[in-house]
Image (tube, helix red, strand yellow):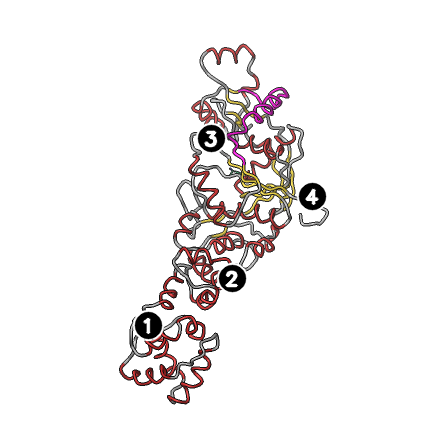
Amino acid sequence: MSQNSAPRPILRFAPSPTGLLHVGNARTALYNALVARREDGTFILRYDDTDTARSTAEFAEAIAEDLAWLGLAPDRVEHQSKRLALYDASVERLKASGHLYPAYESEEELEAKRLSRRRRGLPPIYDRAALALTPAQRAAFEAGGRSPHWRFRLDGRRVEWVDLVRGPQHIETGALSDPVLIRADGSYLYTLTSVIDDIDMGVTHVVRGEDHVTNTAVQTEIFEALGARPPVFAHHNLLTLPSGEGLSKRLGHLSLRALREDGEEALAVAALAVLTGTSMAVEPVADLDTLAARIDFSKISRAPARFDPQELAALTGATLHLLPYAAVGERLAALGVAGGEDFWLAVRGNLARLADAAGWWRVVEGPVAPVVAAEDAAFLAQAAGLLPEIWDGEVYARWIASVKPASGRAGRALFHPLRFALTGQESGPELKALLPLIGREKARARLLGQAA
Ligand code: GLU
């Protein structure tokens, strides 16, 4: 996939807008988007919204927003609900070639058939009774008010493909029910529309969760029935809750929205979503290109992987410690932090969440209520008197070099009272970086025990 001569890949993420994206969906989106980005390809966001009863415009918008939060910008956005004419044309072809056939059983009748097959020790697959219907029998059903659903006639053969994650795969489609591709109300199922779109959009790689492995056998037959060669498939393992329970969009598990509101960093979510459940170490990244470079389908594990929110919190901190000012400047401004790059570089190593930067900005800006113990007051007044006149990036080192011999203090007895007075706190970013930002006047006042 990464050979120079390979054509530019076209990948797609095809969520149904029926809920908020969770980290498992993010994993799929990231694999597709980042491979496209790395290999100069195209990333399509394709809403799988033919199920009009469950899809909403609000969820579609939320998906776009969540992807943007992750830093993923699709090159093309499509809604399947707006592409029905294209599907109609392919459906006519499949009907004409006999690949689609009408069936009239109700859900209850199908359930009864499954039960009876089970009782006879047979697999509960559709018995293809509808294939034997005469035109007169069909007409009678329709006259009786039944509209058909349409099934795809599987070849009943061994479908084989080389999966980029799972290696050589084969599925006997004879063991599967002929899938329903058109509901009785005339609406199309994703299984069909996805193939028509993948052909129409020239999708080269379908990267999706392993819950779609069986679909791949069925869809391979549909690709071929439509005269197309199937794309390359990669089915990644699924992420689960820490309990091992599967993630559900419907139940709102680990939604990107909630993680964002909790203050998790998008790059941390992305790194964990991509690297969990692989043989690669989970490490923070400072940008998506770095993460894209690490994606290697052959390193994705076969077993489901647990997504650990505690690991995410730690990764959010570790990510912040790496981020350049350019990556956070706007968000800092939105938090009311007016400090620039020097401030950011001074505090980033102490943040668990970006919002913590606001607290350190208040320390710089003041007013800070200094903490001065009675026994340190004289020492701090002496230190205030020694504050250098030249206030540059090296001011702290010069100051300490004079405070040390003058006071005779060293180590904790020297540094702890200074920090407590200057910041009002016992620990925090290096004073070396904070002092130039606090400024001479405020530093002096705080050392003298005055709020400033
Ligand atoms: N809407 C399907 C899903 O979200 C798309 C699967 C596919 O990528 O083909 O699981």
Task: Name the amino acid, label 2.
Answer: Pro
2 or 3: tag closer to the N-terminus: 3
Task: Name the amino acid, label 4.
Answer: Pro
Residue 444: where, in percent of width, then height?
35, 77
Residue 134: where, in percent of width, then height?
56, 13
Pick the front one: 372 or 188: 372
1 or 4: tag closer to the N-terminus: 4
Q: Are marks 4 and 3 in contact (CB under 8 Å)?
A: no
Point 62% across, 38% down: residue: 203
Residue 85: where, in percent of width, then height?
56, 25
Count the labels in the image.
Answer: 4
Most frequent secondary structure within the magenta stretch:
helix
Query: Which disc number belongs to residue 324?
Result: 2
What is the magenta range? 78-102
Q: Nearer the viewer, mark 3 or mark 1?
A: 1
Residue 182 visible in rendering: yes
Cβ of mark 4 under 8 Å from ligand 1: the answer is: no
The residue that mark 1 highlights is 424
